[in-house]
Image: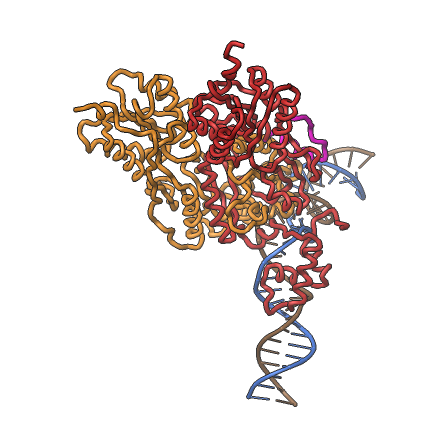
Chain colours: A red, B orange, C blue, D brown
DNA sequence: CGACGGACGTTATACGTAAAACGTGGGGCT
DNA sequence: AGCCCCACGTTTTACGTATAACGTCCGTCG
């Protein structure tokens, strides 16, 4: 496991395998048929794996004169629509050995920059959302400087983290609902394995447990309107006293909850209060407007980048969670029972 | 204007300026103080400009051993939230001489690919949305193979285009509303200079003009809920007979129209019908669910990529617009007048 | 008057890869 | 027996850049 501080090159692999650099290139480029014996090829591959060899893309691109990479320019605000465009393009690209990189045209990114300055790539570091969990193992393969967004600060990755203070957000939500008089809460949780969602569940549970006579039920749903709809519908038609409030991990889940409640003939907020998290456009598009925890996505990104810069310069990244704020709108009100005379 | 078929290198610039390649590197790297005379430096810069010199980033990266580029890994579906994350990160990055490239973690992009395979960059070609108009001039600076999405097919750019058949979509919308009995329509148009929006206005106008006794009014709004709200509100409170239907260029505009109508005490679809374009999550999140033109974003992306591949291989890109389909939901109904007995 | 240093450049080199050009030994064919 | 060609590699080169190391020429100072 003794690794040199510098990345292994094809020459290192060659030395380890006892062959020339050219042989390594042939084997790894899968052009060795009839040029290298199968046994030698195997030895080369083993050595490459052993050393954790990754070809230097800058060198390859320079040599080849092309990059098999394509740029997709999309309007500044990456909407769901263009996310789909990207997915389709990336699929076809992958099938053809191409890669796709997104370049959202800049807006408020300082002076108008050369659209291609951003597109050089090969990486000095990585900022990763904890929700993109599947990519993480591969990321650790390289030992690139890494900053995790919204990940367990004590996680095993040993990476710097930048977190939203989502625990405080859920504290605010819980206090708001308790103050209004709610005692039975349904937690519509995102069915995604991520630290940030675990925190939400834990915070809601402990906060409620501190108040006698309260009750929390949890139901999980994928982050989609359909998923939230069915999950909420079945949770609310279950036997037992009906919750007076639905706390959702996400605005989109809240939108699904709205639809479920409508379908059940219940009104928001008169019969049931609803809260979300994010405060994107959706929160004010639905009726009534959603009481939700506002996350400052841009600040989040800035802090993530600053942390990565710190790591790259050998400094200690700034610590401290990013504050969040509950925005109270029309979807929360005192429960019926509380409105009735005692 | 006679350009060599291959990109000029720093050596070409050197030759043109009558100096060595090293001098070019010094001047362009702004490290020439006390090493090169001001006059020579000026000559070098002129030559570089003249030849349209662009440094080869692969070579630079190889030489420097770093790239000043960072990867942001986001969950597969690039949501508005992560668009904000990107914006913030990109701003800080730009201030520090870094670039940011988006890598949405793949989902349904064939076999799980190396997360970094996509991130090599330096470009073979470009796919550009016509809405990212500001970036286009710079794009033409390089003479990279270019595919435009939803752009004027006869445009001056001389680039390949891939278009949605949005004209047919608006034909379907118009016919749907005419069949229901609507005669007075408000067109809530996107205030964005783009071919695709021009087509919508034109198609609606000509289609309606073919039917006597019909009338279209147009009001423009930025693509946001707030913008749509105020535009719709003022358009509907203007003097004259009230439109019985609002045709929106976009689902988000439709959501704004909903809010304006609610504020005016009008019900959808009983008092006013509403249509949109896109059919994203928003269309079914609002109540009633929106009658809208469904655009197949993924197919759009695939076709864009295929076209670019064709251009790169010297083939003729496949032609033919991408079909779209009107999805009828609860936001359209016959107007009151048509329901009344004749 | 000799040498010294600043102004102005140039030459040479390395980054890591891909692949063309170049061996070399031995088995099979004529 | 002589030759060729195949299996199996190696040596060498080039991609375009940044920069360390190395000249010159001339004015100036001791």
Vertical comparison of B64 with A331: above or below? below
Which residue lies at the image location 62% right of the left edge and 62% below the top edge? A27
Q: Position of residue A109 (x, y in %)?
A: 53, 30
Observer able to see residue A76: no
In the rendered image, which quarter is residue B262 located in? top left
Q: Nearer the viewer, residue B90 or B172?
A: B172
Q: Position of residue B286 (x, y in %)?
A: 41, 28
| Magenta span | A301-321
In the rendered image, which quarter is residue B177 located in? top left
Vertical comparison of B61 with A64: above or below? above
Which residue lies at the image location 72% right of the left edge and 32% below the top edge? A315
Q: Nearer the viewer, residue A269 or A216?
A: A216
Which residue lies at the image location 56% right of the left edge and 20% below the top edge? A326
The furthest residue to the front: A239
As for residue A310 lying within the magenta part, the answer is yes
Q: Position of residue C14 (x, y in %)?
A: 70, 51
- Quarter holding the C terminus of chain B is top left
As for residue B104 lying within the magenta part, the answer is no
Vertical comparison of A302 with B16: above or below? above
Q: Position of residue A262 (x, y in %)?
A: 42, 26
Q: Nearer the viewer, residue B222 or C3?
A: B222
Count of numbered labels shown in the rendering: 0
């Amino acid at each position: 496991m003794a690794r040199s501080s510098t990345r292994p090159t094809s020459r290192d692999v060659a030395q380890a395998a006892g062959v020339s650099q050219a042989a390594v290139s042939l084997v790894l480029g899968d052009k060795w048929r009839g040029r290298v014996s199968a046994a030698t090829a195997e030895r080369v591959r083993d050595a490459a794996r052993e050393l954790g060899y990754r070809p230097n893309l800058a060198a390859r691109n320079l040599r080849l004169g092309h990059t098999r990479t394509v740029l997709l320019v999309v309007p500044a605000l990456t909407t769901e629509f263009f996310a789909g465009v990207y997915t389709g393009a990336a699929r076809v690209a992958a099938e053809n050995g191409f890669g796709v990189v997104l370049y959202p045209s800049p807006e408020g990114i300082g002076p108008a920059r050369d659209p291609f300055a951003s597109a050089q790539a090969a990486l000095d570091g990585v900022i990763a959302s904890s929700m993109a969990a599947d990519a993480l193992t591969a990321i650790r393969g390289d030992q690139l400087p890494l900053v995790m967004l919204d990940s367990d600060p004590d996680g095993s990755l040993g990476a710097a983290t930048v977190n939203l203070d989502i625990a405080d957000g859920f504290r605010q939500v819980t206090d708001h609902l308790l103050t209004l008089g709610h005692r039975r809460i349904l937690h519509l949780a995102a069915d995604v394995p991520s630290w940030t969602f675990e925190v939400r569940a834990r915070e809601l549970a402990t906060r409620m447990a501190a108040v006698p006579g309260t009750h929390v039920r949890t139901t999980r749903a994928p982050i989609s309107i359909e998923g939230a709809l069915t999950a909420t519908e079945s949770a609310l038609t279950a036997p037992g006293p009906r919750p007076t409030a639905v706390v959702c991990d996400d605005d989109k889940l809240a939108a699904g909850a709205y639809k479920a409640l409508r379908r059940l003939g219940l009104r928001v907020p008169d019969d049931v209060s609803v809260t979300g998290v994010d405060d994107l456009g959706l929160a004010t598009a639905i009726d009534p407007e959603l009481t939700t925890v506002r996350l400052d996505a841009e600040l989040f990104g800035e802090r993530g980048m600053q942390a990565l810069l710190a790591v790259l310069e050998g400094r200690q990244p700034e610590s401290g969670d990013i504050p969040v704020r509950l925005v109270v709108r029309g979807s929360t009100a005192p429960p019926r029972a509380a409105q009735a005379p005692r």
